Every structure is written in C-alpha cells, then in structure tokens.
Image: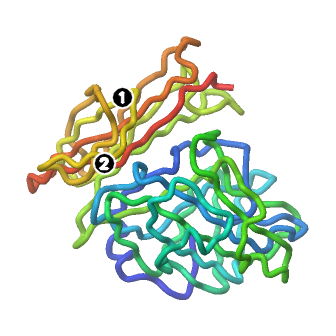
Amino acid sequence: MIRSFACLALASALAAQVQTTAHVQRSTLGTNGNVAPLGCSATGLFAEAHSQILIPAQYLPGPGAVLLGLGALGRSSAGTNTTLTYGLLRIRVARTTATSLQATFASNLVQPQTLLDVANLTVDWQANAFTPITFLNSYVHDGQSSLVLDIQKIVSPIGDAGFATIQNSRRTDLPRMINAFGGAGSGAHAATTASVLTNSPISLELRWAGFGGARTPTVQLKSDPTAAFRAPFGIGNPVDTIVQGEPGALFANFESLVATPGVAVPGLIGQVWIADPILFDIGVLSAAGQHTTTQVLPNDPAWIGLYLAFQSLLIEPDDEWRLTNLADCFVSNGL
C-alpha cells in the first residue's frame, strides 16, 4: 500500500478500471534481484540511484492508453514485507524509437514527461506481490513508440535487511537496464552517466486505463514454477494468458512462433505484432473485464528454447475492434 500526501484525481476515478501489462512476465516468484532502481542495502550502499529501463513498443498497449502507475516486485533478504521511505522518488518517461539505451541518461530522454516527483514517500512493499506506485501525472501512449522509464531515488537504509526488486525473466534478449548508484549523500541519484549495464530489467507491472473511464485492452503471461526455485515457462509448467478489457467484449487469443514489427490494419485499433497466428481460445470477458486461459507446456525437451508470442483481438460492446500488446516467452528447462 502506498501512503503519500497527494493523490491524482484521475487515478482515483479509474482505480477500479485499471488494466495491466507485465514487463516481461507476470510471475511473482524469483530469487534474482536488483537493488539499484527502488531498493537498498542494509549498509546503505544503494541509498541513492539513477536507473533507466527501455520497454519495447510491442509490449505496450494501443493508442490512447493512459499510464497511471507502475507496480514492482520486491522483497527483503529475509523474504518478508518491508516498509521504505523515499526521501526522493522521481519517475519520468519518454517516447523513443531506440532499441537500446546509451550510457548517458539524458541521451535516452527526449522531451520527457515527469510522472512522479515526491519527497518523503512511504511504500509498504509486499513480499511476492506487485506493489503499486501511483503517479501524480499521467502519460498518454501513442500505440507505436517504445518507452524509457527514468527512476531517481534516495531511500533510507532499513538496517537489518536488504531490499531488492526482482528480476525473474532471465531474458537477455531484452534491452539492458542501466544504473548508477552510491551511498547516502553520494549524489548518485543525479548521476548523468550510468556505471552499470544490467542484462535483465526488473519485473514491472504497468497500470493503464483509457480516456473517459474506458478500458484499454491488454494481454499478459503468467507462469509460476511448479516447484521451488524453478524457472517460469519451463516444460511441463502451466502458462496463463490473461486478457483484460471492457466487460462483455468478445476476445480471440492468438499465439505464434514469430513476432513481427508492428503492422497497422485498417479497421483495427492498435498494431499486429505476430505473424502466422493460430487461434487457441475465444470467448467473452467477464463482468470484471478479464479472462484467463491456462495451457500446459509439453514436458518435452524438444520444446526448450522455443519462442512463443501471444496477442489478443477484442471486439468491444461499442463495436470497436482493438488489438492488445504482445506478450511472449522462451520455453525453459524449468531449472
């Protein structure tokens, strides 16, 4: 739960109508972590940091989606809930066509928008759950650009345990996250150049809505391992395809072995991100505006390393045809 002195009226009005995308997966399990973006160490080593994350366009919703906040997955080294106070938490966003981040932070932020800039923000981090952080300003997505998230933080050390945000995707094919960090008073939150390039971005949940209280359709994947310390999307493990949108909308779920650059199709809102799609489920979204389809990956070593891409088409009650973002994974050995 987040406690702050300000609240965005738009976010409050749409709180019950938020859809989410996951970067890059929904799984809440994982042991790998990164302290820099939002965490800290018991010694205060990471009390200050400046981080950037590049989210490619295919993982973002269609045009008009309004970004209201994010959720991060984190826990203390003891595996328990943790409360942190941020002396500063500043989050900015910028559109980009770049496919990687440069080491100089400003080079990656062209015409940035400030979404959050607060002091003395207390965040109650929940172990093994995405903890939401609500922005004070919103960003309207154009449906075709990639997105750079810029995070600057100063946080008080918690003394008896470290806290990290989880990296559970093992996706070395994604753009590298960049970081600069230091102890209290180091000025690292204002660093202009990254000192560390990290292969895997932290696991994030982006929280979206549409204009006028409408919903924006999204799809995401979840694959929690069936045994402790096993990787998601392993052979023999279930994969949930989670579609969100307007209640009562007709949905069609497609999967493919091939992702493609975004293609606009007349009559459809959004872009096509997969080639040679195969329909694997069709239905109507519930009154909550969500549907989950569960498939089990074959327990066959020949599947290890296989790329799977997912996208959904929604026909909404007002007869608008909308495409979701792309969600994808690589099948692992489960270890």
Q: Name which of mark 2 and mark 1 comes first in the sequence.
A: 1
Q: Which residue is mark 1?
A: 256
The amino acid marked with disc number 2 is Thr
Foreground pick, 19 / 328: 328
Where residue 334 sits: x, y (%)?
A: 63, 25
Q: Say if 118 sits above or below 170 in the image.
A: below
Count residues near mark 1 (Cα–Cα under 10 Å), then give few for <14, some for 14-19, many for 20+.
Answer: some
Where residue 222 sits: x, y (%)?
A: 49, 39
Question: Does residue 210 appear in the picture of this structure?
Answer: yes
Where residue 94 sits: x, y (%)?
A: 48, 71
Separation (CA) of disc 2 from disc 1: 15 Å
Q: Which residue is mark 2?
A: 324
Where residue 234 sits: x, y (%)?
A: 58, 25
Question: Does residue 288 appear in the picture of this structure?
Answer: no
Left or right for 64, reference 241: left
- Judging from the image, what secondary structure is the residue with disc 2 in? loop
Q: Say if 253 sits above or below 82 in the image.
A: above
Left or right for 298, reference 161: left
Residue at x 32% of width, y 47% of height: 262
Which part of the image, by quadrant, shows the N terminus? bottom right
The amino acid marked with disc number 1 is Ser
